[in-house]
Image (cartoon, rainbow, N blue to C red):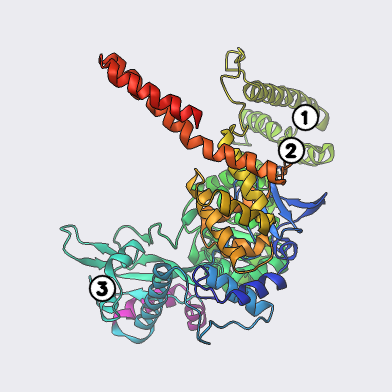
Amino acid sequence: MNTGHSGGIPEEVIEAVLQHNDIVDTVSKYVHLTKQGKYMKGLCPFHSEKTPSFTVTPERQIFYCYGCGAGGNAIKFRMEIEGLSFPEAVRLMAEESHVPFHDHKGTAVSPQNKELERLLQAHEWAAKLFHYLLKNTEHGKAAMDYLRNRGFGDKLIDQFQIGYAPDRWDTLVQFFEKRSFDLKEMEKGGLLSSRQNGSGYVDRFRGRVMFPIMNRSGRVIAFAGRILGDGQPKYLNSPESRLFNKSRTLYNLNLAKGAIRKQGQVVLMEGFGDVIAAWDAGVQHTVATMGTALTENHAALIRTLTDEVVVCYDGDNAGQAAALKSIPILEGAGLHVKVSVLQNGLDPDEYIKTYSKERFVDQIIHGAVSTTKFRLIHVKKHHNLLEEDGKAAYAQEAIGIIAQLGSPTEREVYLKELSTEVGVSLESLKQDCNLARQTYSRKQAQSQNSNSNRSNGADASGKSFRGGSRKQAGAPALLPAYHVAERRLLSIMLQDGEAATYVSDQLGDRFNIPEHAALAAYIYSYYAQGKPPDISRLIASLQDDRLEKTATSISMMDEPLDTSLRGMDDYIREIKKFPKQKQIEQKREEMLRAEKSGDFLQAAQIASEIIALERE
């Protein structure tokens, strides 16, 4: 039994998990798929796109995105979508499909990536230590008083594993040393900092209330620390690490994902304190970006769970400006967006304390407005409607927003409201709106023409590029003949064990591209164990991101392949020819250098070597 490349998990477990988890069923829980011939297509959950380039092949049990290159089998999909390691994904899928999960010794399975697992264990231990210090020691008394004053009861503190990092330099350092953790690894993981003089390590978090940040499966991957008192910075997050990527992490997603699917909606906030307060108010489909700006990756992550978002940012100017910036990012990911309007500059936590949990749910969450309404409210704040000039300026700015709406009914609804607000007839506003729409349509057309010219090989001056000296935007680069031959040969090998044996005899590891040579070695090994062709199972045996992407990309090739012996011999000949061609080019350069230096005897000797190589 071979367990070398699967994190200690027996192959029969991996195969059983793949058999019980159809790729279409697995992906469909996160992505809306539509049938197109022998493929299923949808919007990629791993990057923002409007045109589907994400493809699932039921026949081969794999997925592949032509936009970002993500690809693999059902296990790989769960790893990527939920931020899991390979053993975690297999364990989870095995439990869900009732597949017995033991290693060949009958003990718990050890992960393939030991360093990653050590960092995860260290974060789990740190979270437990901070939580214990908060609740059970004199160190944590001031932090506990602070939390109590904010309305955090024991139930919330336990549920979100809130803790306290004492105002000492070496609490975690000593803790990790006693448990034989590598302190350099702990620094790389963001838990410790190296001393400025380079002599040892200190705790990164000191004198702070600690909020653990979990991945989708509930494992601690980072911390956010809020200082007690007036020090700076007020909030300190873990740095980016192998575990933690801010632009791909949403606070509370591990607890909220079930409620998000149930509600068909996610509430997006700015801070973890707001999320916890909303949770306590009964709004449990809430996540936060932890103070960092919303990214396309965040939007794509949300899109895997739901298609509706309520943006509930702080009511101050900065929060409302951030909400405005978030709208195009979320809509660009194909999400339907509503925005909560918090009065008097309050944040969600303050609003709940000031008014009540019930009013927060009713007026702020259920009362969220459309993005158009939110823009109009935001614009209105900047004009004095008690003056005629202010009314006129507001009307013109509002018409510019309303004119962009595609639906005549929607436009009329907002224009009627505007008519009442500014005391101008609906007919007059309609005329102005029609003019604004003409201007808007003209600008859009010019923009599209400009983009079209650029993509068709025209520069900003309108001159086209002749002779194919520039590639068309987005067009794939033309691959050299040997590269194409290698991909075609590997594609045949992925589907045919006998072909793989033939290539092994004729070519072995003499592929020119290192990834192709490595993939070929795995294919030879796979068939040598007497296994039938199965791309999904073969990908599961690779356990290497680059090779998985390479194998998936090659298996998705839709071009005709010559699978005859003669065809494969042609591919092999092309592959073998390339090193000789490269050698000839190098020899020609050497010959030119010899001629330039006047060493004609050396040049003649090299010329005869070139002739011999060309004959070969």
552 or 456, nearer to the observer? 552
**Observer able to see residue 445:** yes
Which segment did they paint magenta? Answer: 139-159
Mark drawn on residue 429: 1
346 or 446, nearer to the observer? 446
245 vs 327, left or right, is: left
Q: Is residue 465 above or below residue 123?
A: above
Q: Are marks 1 and 3 in contact (CB under 8 Å)?
A: no
Name the amino acid type tagged 3. Answer: Val
Residue occupying the point 29% across, 84% down: 138
- Which of the 4 image quarters holds residue 398? top right
- Which of the 4 image quarters holds residue 344? bottom right
Number of numbered callouts drawn: 3
Name the amino acid type tagged 2. Answer: Leu
Residue occupying the point 63% across, 36% down: 386
Q: Are marks 2 and 1 in contact (CB under 8 Å)?
A: yes
Q: Are marks 3 and 2 in contact (CB under 8 Å)?
A: no
Name the amino acid type tagged 1. Answer: Leu
Q: Is residue 23 above or below residue 598?
A: below
- Per the picture, the main secondary structure of the magenta-coloured stretch is helix
Instruction: Give the labeled residue for mark 2.
Output: 418
**Real-space Cα separation, disc 1 to disc 3, in angstroms:** 68 Å
How busy is the neighbourhood of tag 1: few (under 14 within 10 Å), some, or many (20 plus)? some
Q: Nearer the viewer, mark 1 or mark 3?
A: 3
**Observer able to see residue 382:** no
Mark drawn on residue 173: 3
| Picture coordinates of residue 88, whole percent (x, y) | 54, 72
| Picture coordinates of residue 311, whole percent (x, y) | 61, 54
Q: Earlier in the sequence, mark 1 or mark 3?
A: 3
